[in-house]
Every structure is written in C-alpha cells, then in structure tokens.
Image: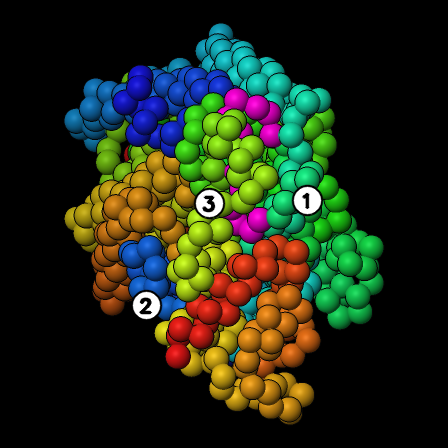
Amino acid sequence: MNWLRSLLLPAQGSAYASEYDTLFLFITLLSAFFFLLIAATAGWFVWRYRRAREQAPTSMVTQSLALELTWTLIPLAIVMGIFFWSLNQYVGASVAPGDAMEIQVTAKKWLWAFEYQNGTRTVNEVHIPVGKPVKFVMSSEDVIHSFFVPSMRLKQDVLPNRYTELWFTPTTTGMHTLLCAEYCGRSHSDMLGKIWVDDDATFQKWLEEGDESTRTMPLKELGKMLYESRGCSTCHSIDGTRGDGPSLRNVFAHDIKLADGKTVIADANYIRESILEPQAKIVLGYEPIMPTFQGLLREREILALIEFIRSLN
Amino acid sequence: MAEGTNYLTETRGLKSWLFTVDHKRIGVMYFWSIMTALFLGGVFAMLVRIELLTPRQTIMSAETYNRMFTLHGAVMVFLVLIPSIAATLGNFVLPLMLGAKDVAFPRLNLASYWIYVAGALFGLYSMIAGGIETGWTFYTPYSTSAGGGVTPMVLAAFILGFSSIFTGINFIATIHKLRAPGLTWFKMPLFVWGMYATSIIQVLATPILGITLILLLMERMFQIGIFDARLGGDPLLFQHFFWFYSHPVVYIMILPGMAIMSEVIPVFSRKTIFGYKAIAFSSIAIAVVGFFVWGHHMFVSGQSPLAGAIFSFLTFLVAIPSAIKVFNWLATMYKGSISLEAPMLYAISFLLLFAIGGLTGLFLGSIATDVHLHDTYFVVAHFHFVMFGGTVIAFLAGIHYWWPKMFGRMYSEKWARVSAVLVFVGFNLTFIPQFIMGSRGMPRRYYNYLPQFQPMHVASTIGSWVLGLGFLIMAGYLFASLRKPYDAPSNPWGGATLEWETASPPITHNFETTPAVTHGPYDYAALRSDA
C-alpha cells in the first residue's frame, strides 16, 4: 500500500498524519471496490444483454424488496462505520494538550506573522521544536484566510472576528510548507510560509538569538533574503514591473510623487518609515494596503532592506 | 415526418417566439440561451486551464485569472447548471409526458424566461462594471470589500432566483393539476417525479439565496453590520446562509440529471425500470435531507466541532438514496435488450462518472479526511464529477434522447458516438489528475503554484482540449441535423411515455386529442403488442 500512499498523499510530518493516511487509504480502497463493482456490472450487462434483434423479449422483473433492502442497508452500515472512525479521529485531533507551546498567528493580505510567548516575532517563517505539541492561535486582520499544512493533514480557517486554533506534534525535522487555502485576493497563491521543525537545541538557540545568518550575513545579501522571505516580493517587483505596490528598482535617492501632491526623496529615512508606518506617505497611483512591519523586523534587518533597495539602482 | 404544421412552423417571425406562451418554444429558447452560456463558461474554463500550464504567469495576470475562475463558476452555476435540465427539457417534455397542452401558468413560464435573460445580462454587465473576483461563493468579508463588479453579479444571481422559483411553481401546479385521465401518481414517468422533487427545492430554497444576497448588497452599500466583522457582523453567518441555499442547489442540479437517467436506461434496455417506488421516493428523500447538510462545506470554517459532527452524520445519510438509484438503474439493465445509441452512451458515462463523484464524496463527508482536502483540487475534481459527470452528462443524454422530438430531425449517430467518447475521455483526463493534486496538497483558486504540481496541471489542461474538441464535434453534427428536412419518426427509440405518442416535432397543442393512458410509462411489452 506504500506506493499508493506516496502517489496520493504528501510526506507525513506527524503521528496524526499517519493515522489520517490509514483512514484515507481505507476509503480509497473501499471506493475503488465499489467503483469496480458498478463498472464491471454495467459492462457485463451491456455485453451480455446487448440487443441482438429488435423484438427480443426482456425480463418482466420490476422490483424486489430483498434487493432494495440489501443495497440500502449494506451501504448504510459501511458509511456509518466511516462516520464513527472519522469522528473519533477528528475529536482526538481537536483538543490540544495543555502543555502545548503557543504561537500567535496573524494573517493578513498576504503574509503570515508569528509571535512567540517570549516576544520573538517572525514573518512567513516559523521555527518549532520536534516532538513537542505546538498550538497556533490565529486571527486575521482583514478577510478570511486558511492555515493549511499538508504534511500535517491539517487546515483551519483564520477569521477576523474570533480566534481559531490548530495544533500538532511534529515528528520529523525539516521544512514543512504552509499555504493559504481560503481565497483572499490577488496574491492568495503567494501567501506561503515555511515551518521549520528543529531539534530541541537548535530551536532553543534560534529562539534566543535569531537566525545565525541574520547576525552574520552581509547586509545586501540579508536584505535580498528578507525581501523574498518576508512577503515584500508579493507586491514589490525589483525589475520595474508594476505590482500592487511600486517597484523597488531605481527608487533609492530618487524623487517620489505622493498621493497628496507632495514630492519626497526616497532616502534611508523614507524607506524606514515606509516599512514601519506604510500609511504615512502613499505613493501616487497606489492604494494604502501595505501592512505595517513594526515589531516584525530587527534593526539590522531594516538596515539590510535599505541596503538591498539601494543596490537596485 | 410531420405533415402540415408543427409548433416550430405554425407561426413565424421573431415576435412569435419572443412572446410565445408555448412551453415547447420557451424550452427551445431556454435551450439556445443556456447553450450560449455553456459556451461562454467553457471558454472561461479553457482560459483558466491554459493559464495553469505553467507554475507562474502564462497568458494572463493574477487579477484576470481570478476574474476568469469567478466568471466560470458564476456562469456555470447560475446560468447553466441550475436552469439547464429543468428549464429546457423539463419545459419541453414535462407537459407532453403528462398528456397536457401546456404548463399550468404559460405566461409565468414566459416571464421566467425573460427574467433569466435579464439576470444573465446583469451578470455579463459585471464584467465591464469593474469585474468580479470574489469566486462564485461571494464569501464575506472579501466580497463586501472587493471592487465594482460584485454588485451587478450579486443582483444577477438575485434576479435569476425568481426565474428558478417561477419554473418550480409552474411544474408543481402542472404535475398536480394537468395529468391526463388515468395518469395516477405512480403511473407518472420518473422524469416527472424528479422534476417534482427539484421544483420543491427550487421553491423552498431559492428565497433564502435572495434574502442572503440582499443582505450582502445592503452590507456593501449601507454598511448595516451583519456580515462584516469590522462593523460587528459575523462572516460565518454569511457562509451558513449561503450554503443553506447552495447545498440544496446541488440537488436542484443533480435530481433532474437522475430523472433523465430513469428514462433513458429503461428505454434503451427495453425493460421496465427496476424499483420504481424506490427511485421515486429516493428523490423526495434527497430533496428533504438535502436541506440539512449545508454545514459540511464549513468543517474548517470555525463552526463548532459538534455542529461539524452532526452535519457529517446527515451527509452520510443523504448519500444512501443516490446509491439506491445507481443500483436500481443497474438492475434495470439486467436481462434487458440493450442498445448503445448516443443517449445510452451518455447514460453509461453518467453511471461511471457519477459513481466516482459520489464515492469521492465519502472522503469529504467524513469530517477528519475533509480537513486536509477542503479547498484543494480534490474538492474541485469531486464537484466537477458530480456537476459535469452527473448533471451535464445527463443533460447531454437528454438532449440526444429528445432531440428528434424537439427539432424533428435525427443527428448523425456516428459522430454522436465519437463525440460521446471524446467527452468521456477528455473529462477524465482533465479531472482525475486534479484528485491526485488535491490530496497531495494543491489548494484551489491558485494562480501561482508549486512546481511539483506542473505535470498534473499539464495533463489536466490537455484533457480540457480533448473535452473541448468533443463539444465542437457535437455542435457540428447537431447544427448539421437542423439543415435537413424533418426525418424523425414520432417514436425513434421505442419509448413508452406519452411524448412519443405525438408527432416529431409536436403540433402546437401537443396532442390531437387528449391521450388516454392505457399502459405504464415503462411497459415496453404493451408497446410491442400494439405494433
């Protein structure tokens, strides 16, 4: 059955995923059986009772209570079996253990922001320790999004007016893809994130000190990495094409026309302000839709982004 | 073979059509209108598939792509699937099957057609009024904050609802009051039972959609604070309202398809339908239980787990009547005398595709498995197997079955078979890869996608071309048949229902004299002894 599992389902990231796959494959085989039964019966009848001559007599049977009961009760019993199996699994996966590590998630067009209990904040990337239950407590700042981690077989909508939760215990280290599964507009399909499952020591080090690379990488390179990983590239191009936000090419130190008629020079302070308070100065011809990155970037990371934008001239 | 006049030739000129109260002409006008909408919706679908050939931009921007899939969904659901079988074949055939001269309220019938056209034009107007990119589901708060085209499209769906309600009222009254002498309820063809169940849902569920859409418009225009969280509203409430209509609407679409199956299979097997009452009552059971399963669209929405469990349970219950029908159709073929003309080819296609559609529903009704599959291509493939593999394929079976009656001509059987096979193969090639993509984690409504999914997207797009070719060939031989003189006999397939007792095409008043019901709707032995 392994070949079927790896054909139909993504890699397993938790014990729940493997339970899930068992139920999934059971329904698959059951469906395949009934499909073949229907197809073979239809095929056999079409061939066996094909019309040989116009006036061929046909059977006069019109009903059978025994048959009707058979094909009502057997499917009923089977679907009730699936119902209880599935419900049992669902209930087990619904309640997070009390000692689960909590991470706050804020979804907005079009990024995922994470906040740890110690105040560490990240965007579109989250690190968690292997083998420990993690609970994401989620809300949205605008429309409905949906937190979807295929390797965990879990998904939960994220709403603007309430908290929703999703938890799992990862069992394999490495990167797991996070996708937005509820349609949320133009860049819905770019609203992706990475969930890094680390061994405990690596995770603790990361939580205290941040990424090794963030501290040592040259500014320009770090800026480029952040531009791609923190959601900037969703709206701002670096080749001059127009997106939801202005392109970053040939911006630095150039005159910028604002929506209120003024003109400013895009110096380091202007770019810093645009990242932290995006609504303060709106570029002419664009909508004020950029979310603030206040608290989501370290000081060195802001410097790195400014350096990266400067390099695009 | 009609001598003299028939309903097509009795009066001439555009006005004689636009202001006709003849159910057959209204059915034919619906037919061409819905075929136009099907063509448009199909073009949108092909463009969506071409865009998905590559993981990044192929031929259109993200914004255009989002508008394309919204238009595809809205056009196919509101302009094609909901009215398709009931408004065209139902209008044309139902009074004939009952031995009636027309429907109970002929003017209301014409009004329902004009309302359909008005709604359709409003919907198309949304394309130039700023475009609509909310998806056909109009989820709040996205739809309350999105741009210009939402208002006309929502109004269009609201208007189209009345067309649907009028047709439903008309059919219910017609079935109750206009049956020919001797045509008791259990002598009615099962097509009529299917139409009856459909009409009940249309009349009971559609007003809910109307109310929901009006609330949505009021939220957009006056910010009344019912769905928008910023104004104190609840976005989940919209989903409840929306699916309270939009799940029953699935049965508005599929019950007429099942109704056609219950005609075509016995006729082409020359055998009395097996389990008449089981099929008739299962339609009613679907109509009733179908009202209480809407929450299965919302397992991951944030509704309570208890609600989810109850909806999952009821969803499994509603699956049973559909299974009963499939087994009864199979039993009908047992020891029959089966011929595989185009309508029967489509009926066999339906059996296979609908079986896949129904069985993959098990994954989605089951609450744990749905969590992973919800809003992925698995769901997309599932509902296309039901809506296309079920409703559209049954519609095609019905068109091929009643074409000689409607237009008095036979089409090329050879090309019809070629087309049926292409449609079947193309459809499977398009949607089977989507099941696999979906369970592997490909979300729906994605413009860009992870490169690992490209091979399956390419296969799916190629499938859509095969499917498109099948439809092109179909358009070709159907149009070609209309250029011939009348050559259809009154009863080309050997059917035993009343519509085959009048000429092809029928006269304006359907029957020379009110027909007497002397044998059952599937009594082919009686037909043989007559001949």
Q: Position of residue B111 (x, y in %)?
A: 63, 66
**Residue at (55% x, 75% y) in the render:** A268
Residue at mark 2: B59
Location of residue A296 by image quarter: bottom right
Disc nearest the viewer among 3 and 1: 3
Q: Residue B32 vs residue B339: left or right?
A: right
The front one of A60 and A175 is A175
For residue A131: magenta? yes
Seen as rendered, the residue at the extreme front is A216
| Chain containing mark 1 | A
The residue tagged 3 is A212
Q: Are marks 2 and 3 in contact (CB under 8 Å)?
A: no
The residue wearing badge 1 is A119
Rounded to the nearest angstrom, the CA distance separating label 2 from label 1 is 44 Å
Q: Residues within 10 Å of mark 2 (few under 14, many from 20)?
A: some
Tell me, yes or no, whether the two marked residues, 2 and 1, touch with CB atoms within 8 Å.
no
In the rendered view of the protein, which quadrant contains the C terminus of chain B?
A: top left
Q: Which residue occupies the foreground of this view, B177 or A197?
A: A197
Picture colour scheme: rainbow
Q: How crowded is the residue under tag 1: few (<14 C-alpha within 10 Å), some, or many (20+)? A: few
Q: Where residue B176 sits: x, y (%)?
A: 66, 42
Disc 2 or disc 3, which is closer to the eye?
Answer: 3
Q: Earlier in the sequence, mark 3 or mark 1?
A: 1
Work out whether disc 3 and disc 1 sit on a shared chain. Answer: yes
